[in-house]
Structures are given as C-alpha cells and as structure tokens.
Amino acid sequence: MLQAIAAGIGIAAPIAQGFLADYAQNRANKASASALKQQAGIYGVQAEASLRTAAMYAKQAGMNVALGKGNARNLRLAAANLDPYEQYAMRNARVEARRRVGEGRTQFAANGVMVDTGAAALWEQDEAADAALERLDIMQQFEDQSWEYRTQANKALAEGYAAAAANAGAAMGAAGDAYATRLQQSAALAQAKQKKKKSWYNTIGAVIGTIGGAALGIAGSKFGAGSQAGAVH
C-alpha cells in the first residue's frame, strides 16, 4: 500500500512541478500582456497627438494660402486705385501749365510784346514742352508705384504658397508618424493578445496535468492496495 502511494506521489510530483511552472509562466504572460496593452495605449495617445498635429499644420497651410491671396488681392486693388489719383494729378498738371502760359502771355502783352510771335512764341513752346515732360514724369511715377504694388502682390502670393507647402510637408510628416505609431499599437495589441492566449492555454494544461496526476496517483494507490490484498489472501 505504501509503495503504491509512493508511486502515485512520484507520478504526481513532476506534474505538480509542471503546474507550478505553468502557473508562474501564466502570471508572467499576464503581466507581459498587461504591459503590452499599456504600451499600446501610449502608442494610441501618441498617434492621436500626431493626427491632431497633422490637422493643425493642414489648417495652417490653408490659412497661409488664404492670407497670401488676401494680401495679393489688396495690393492689386491698391495698384488699380492709383488710376483716379493719376488722372487727378494729370489734370492738375494741365491746369497749372495753362495757368503759367496764361500769366506769361498776359505779362508779354502788358509789356507790348506780340504773344504769338518771336520770343513769346518760343517761350510758350518751351512751357508746353515742360508741361508734357511733367505729365510724363507723373505717368512714370504712378506706373512705378503700380508696378511695385503688383510685384508685392506676386511676392505675397508666392510667400503664402511657400508657407503652405512647408505646412503641408509638416502635416505629411505628422501623419506618417501617426501611421507608424498606429502600426506599433497594432503590433503591441497583437502581442498582448498572444500572451493572454498562451496564459489561457498554460492554465488549462496545468489544471489537466494536475487532475491527471492526481488520478494516476489514486489509481496507482488502489491498484497497489488490491495487489497486496490478493497476495495476503
């Protein structure tokens, strides 16, 4: 009887050791799965932050384009609005030229000089030439100002698109970071699921092994007791 029990214990002992090993591995797997799920959560937060950053850069890109277009439009309007000022300046120049000529003719006439001939006529021609040059100068000044406005408008538009391109690049980089982090999150979750699955298998195996070992031990003890009883009989 004692030998049979000892034999059953000998069979059950390795199984019990296996159970303890499986139990320890089960706890380790659960801890690892929990850590992996926490890491996956961190990856998820990082991915969301990267997506928000990408959206922010994309919004800034749109704002920069709109700003560039707005500045360019205002500068082109400023160039267009120069026309009435130019016309006003040209009209004043013509009025002033006629005033000077009128005063000069009056002075010539008061001094007994024929206004349509000789020195008076030459002087009036010079005044007309000076007036024409003055009007050309006014036209050139306004043309230069208009050209400067148009140049600034083109520059503002280009700067807006350049800033938007930089923002778009940053947005793509942030979106790439989000995608990579999502992949890390998926990998961590998959590993956590695998660890949890192994823990479940280890638990089942340990329980089955323990029950089997106990059954073998009991069966062995009964078999040994029956054999001894038969021998005594």
Image (spheres, rainbow, N blue to C red):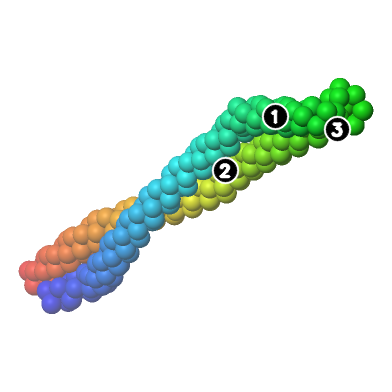
Q: Secondary structure at mark 2?
A: helix
What amino acid is found at the position of numbered circle 2 in the picture? Gly
Q: Residues within 10 Å of mark 1 (few under 14, many from 20)?
A: few
**Residue lying furthest right:** 118
Measured in 3D between alpha carbons, the distance from the residue under mark 3 to the one under mark 2, in whole angstroms, is: 55 Å
> Are the residues tagged 1 and 3 within 8 Å (C-beta)?
no
Look at the image and tell me in which quarter the C terminus lies. Answer: bottom left
Measured in 3D between alpha carbons, the distance from the residue under mark 1 to the one under mark 3, in whole angstroms, is: 14 Å
Residue assigned mark 3:
123
**x then y, percent, for residue 107:** 76, 32
Tell me the residue at 72%/31% (across/down): 103
> Mark 1 or mark 3: which comes first in sequence?
1
Residue assigned mark 2:
160
**x then y, percent, for residue 79:** 62, 33
Indicate which disc residue 41 carries. none
Q: Secondary structure at mark 1?
A: helix
Residue assigned mark 1:
99
> Mark 1 or mark 2: which comes first in sequence?
1
Tell me the residue at 90%/31% (across/down): 119
Residue 15 in sight = no
